Image (cartoon, rainbow, N blue to C red):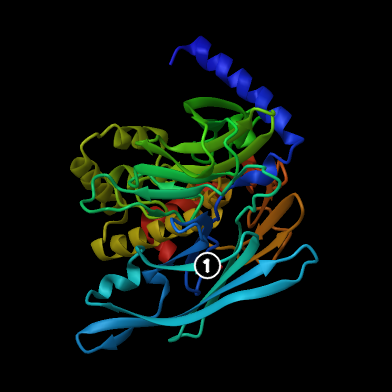
Amino acid sequence: MNNTFTHILTLTFAVLLTGACSNNYYENIDRGSGFQFEPGKPELRLAASGFINEQNTPQILVTGDVVYASLIYKKRDEDISAVINIEVLVERNSESGKKTVVSNQQFTETLIRNDRGAVFDQNVFRFERQFDVEPQEYKVTVSITDLASGANTTRETTVEIPEVEDNTAEITQIRTLAKSSTEEGSQFSQVTTYDIPSQLDSLQFVFQVLKPTSRPMEVESRLIKFNSDSTAAWPMSYQNYPNSSIQYQGIEYDDFEVIQSSLRNLQVRGNILIENNFKGLQEGNYRLEVIAKSDRNEEIIRARDFGIKSAFYPSLKKPKDLAAPLQYLMNDKEFEELTSISDPDSLKSAIDRFWLSNIGNSSTAKSVISMFYERVEEANKQFSNFEEGWKTDPGMVYILFGPPWDFVRYNDRMVWSYSYNLDDPEKNFVFRQPKMKNKFYPFYNFILDRSIYLNSLEYKQKERWLSGSILTRQN
């Protein structure tokens, strides 16, 4: 795209976004949910959307993903199985705050696997349920109980199906669907998190314009990409991030470019379905924004934010994704040489050589590698924001040192302790938030208080990983 044209579009959008703020613009942005990872509990990811079906009946579609590896399995003949109980509760909200139960479904699923590797499988079991409802706002609560352990996970979300009144048009929530174009037979299905792995390279955004009259209306759909941090955390002994840097700011919602724009002129009345399809988007943070304008200058705005992450996020499968977090253990020259390898097989072999040449013992190396990448995946699930969780400051510290023994959370900062001595500067790490999480800045962006005095500690911790002694807890 011509740079001048892009700049003009960006300025135009800035004006539109600023003007829209006073009209509850941010209230109409759906951002999906995070992973909300809790160790020892079933991992549940939830999405719900409202729409009008072909029979003109309002419906809610509830989609849940349960990670196989988060369940407890028992031996069953030649197989292993996990049994989960699922409860889906749909309640209608009222202006008074009172909730009315619309539906409460409970069902049991037995997940049978013939591969004992299921206990490490980060793929998901998906379930969906549809509910006929009336136009209104609803609260959807889904609970999963692992019947082998009794562990329970509950997630909540809200759904709104607008009601057309006084001949005024409305727009439904934007449903986000994805599929892999390289996987034969893959079908579009509802996305359950803000983060979308890039292997799901075909995206579809669906919404409906509920138009009660034949008066003309323009509907403009725009995909925009925000400037955001995508770099790995700096070493602990470096200087702190400059206040003006993208690492400090995290994501800049007033700095973006328009990726694609389309305009539709609607002349007929009725329930009009509109789809926007995108393929092969690069990693980053996006917003699909829909603005409908009538000939009376009435305006309706809906938006859906989402982030494109690495191929199998939050898992790591591709060699280049396995290589990236090793910068926390390598020196600059080693990492530059590693990442200069373009062939995936050669890169995977180089990664294996790095671990074995440092640790020496292949059995110990295997255990250390497993621990390292388990922490990377857990960091992705716990600290994911506008960038992958392992790249954040808490993610780096979590990978190197593991979960803190204790932590204290304040409004704008948190302290992680790896000692019972809370005054030990080498065992207590302070993280600060430059911006508080809110509807205008919907992410936690905790930044480590860096210090040159952490150089020795950081070096010793890297050596523990490279020698294999990380497998032994250090008091």
Q: Give neighbour class at mark 1: few <14, some 14-19, many 20+ (Cα, 10 Å).
A: some
Residue, x 20% and y 37% (percent of image)? 343
Q: In the image as oriented, which residue stretches furthest toward the front?
A: 214
Name the quadrant containing residue 100.
Answer: bottom right
In depth, the one of 345 and 198 nearer the eye is 198
- Does 69 sit above or below residue 378? below
Give the quadrant of residue 128: bottom left
Q: Position of residue 231 (x, y in %)?
A: 49, 36
Residue 390 image offset from top left, x and y in percent: 48, 49
- Is residue 19 visible to us here? yes
Residue 435, percent across and down?
71, 41
Asked if residue 391 can be seen in this view, the reply is no
- Identity of the residue furthest to the bottom in this view: 77
Q: Residue furthest top?
A: 4
Residue 444, percent from left and from top: 64, 49
Residue closest to the eye, 281 or 309 = 281
Decide if residue 438 is on the left or right side of residue 175: right
Q: Amino acid at mark 1?
A: Asp
- Tag 1 residue: 132
